[in-house]
Amino acid sequence: MIQLKIYGGFNSGLKVYSENDVVLFSNVSKNWPESDFINIYNGKKTLITSIKHINRLFKNKFEIFSQTLDIKSINQSATKGYIELDNGDIIKFSYSATNFFTNPYLKIFCNGIEIGKLNNRKFGFSLNYKLLIRDDYTDFLYYILIYILATESNKDYD
């Protein structure tokens, strides 16, 4: 299993670590009352994707403005989400009904097979996650991280 740590503050972006190295990080540009922008960079500070976060009642939509990957769409509701790639592959995410109290916070699926999970610390003044991905699905790792950074970087729990 691949294990990564993800840390950050509420509304301020996240950093993904493998050991002590930054793999990806996000930066949130607040644009009230319009939609916020989330920029995601690799560890060398090169922009990977720029995403507009459109907050809707019971559903979040993410509009991709620029990218170096082949992501077709990202969507999230209260209990599930997905990222669809240009080649037709879909990675699905399922949130536990009790995710505010128990782990895993999120389960990750590809072709109906559970390939990983995201656990989080339940209380604190910062966001703190642990991602576990099966070794045979590393080809999807960047896409999974993009989904997590897009959906979790703008958390505020207001």
Image (cartoon, rainbow, N blue to C red):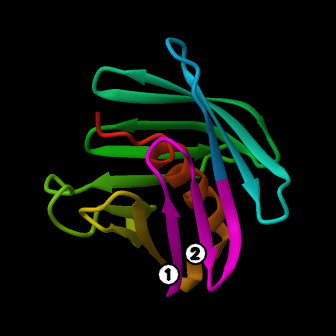
Whether residue 155 is in magenta: the answer is: no
Q: Nearer the viewer, residue 68 or 110?
A: 68
Locate the C terminus and report the quarter of the image it occupies: top left
Identity of the residue drawn at 68% across and 62% down: 24
Q: Give the image quarter of residue 137.
A: bottom right
Q: Do tag 2 and tag 1 residues touch (Cβ < 8 Å)?
A: yes
Q: Which residue is pictured at 39% across the width and 54% down the height?
A: 93
- Outermost residue, front side: 125
Q: Give amino acid for label 2.
A: Tyr
Q: Is residue 47 visible?
A: yes
Q: As drawn, is 11 to the left or to the right of 23?
A: left
- Disc 1: which residue: 134
- Range drawn in magenta: 1-25
Q: Quadrant of residue 141?
A: bottom right
Residue wearing tag 2: 137
Tell me where residue 102 appears, x and y as whole percent.
17, 66
Residue 111, image x and y in percent? 45, 61
